[in-house]
Image: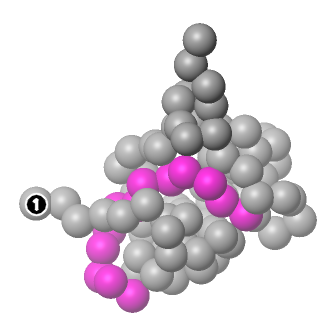
Amino acid sequence: MKLMGVGDEAANSIDGQIQATRDLGWKFIEMRTVEVPGFPKANFHEIPGAAFDLAARKLETSGLQVYCFGSAVMNWAKKVG
């Protein structure tokens, strides 16, 4: 069994998300929205390349792996039709 959670449910910042996941003893995280130092909070697929690279380095250094991605393709803020 692989335990993981949506990172932004614990914290806005990438550092807070990593810390919460590590505090739980988990090795995996689901990325959705994230705030990277020097950049505004946004969905992981919408942050600038430099922010993505920084987040990826922080995740790699922490030993965590991204298991899945919570996209914003369709959510409560979107209208259908």
**Which residue is depicted at the point 84% across and 58% down?**
40
Q: Is residue 1 left or right of residue 19?
A: left
The boundaries of the magenta stretch are 23-35
Query: Could you tell me which quadrant the N terminus lies in?
Result: bottom left
Q: Position of residue 43 (x, y in %)?
A: 66, 46
**Local SS, label 1:** loop
Residue 76 belongs to magenta span = no
Q: Position of residue 30 (x, y in %)?
A: 42, 54
59 and 43: which one is in front? 43
Outermost top residue: 81
Q: Which amino acid type is shown beneath numbered disc 1? A: Met
61 and 12: which one is in front? 12
**Which residue is depicted at the point 67% across and 71% down?**
13
Query: Could you tell me which quadrant the C terminus lies in?
Result: top right
Q: Is residue 25 depicted above or below 1 in this figure?
A: below
Q: Is residue 35 left or right of residue 27?
A: right
Q: Is residue 45 depicted above or below 6 in this figure?
A: above
47 and 61: which one is in front? 47
Outermost bottom residue: 23
**Which residue is depicted at the point 43% across and 60% down?**
6
Q: Is residue 76 visible?
A: yes
Q: Is residue 70 left or right of residue 23?
A: right
Q: Which residue is mark 1?
A: 1
Q: Position of residue 34 (x, y in %)?
A: 66, 59
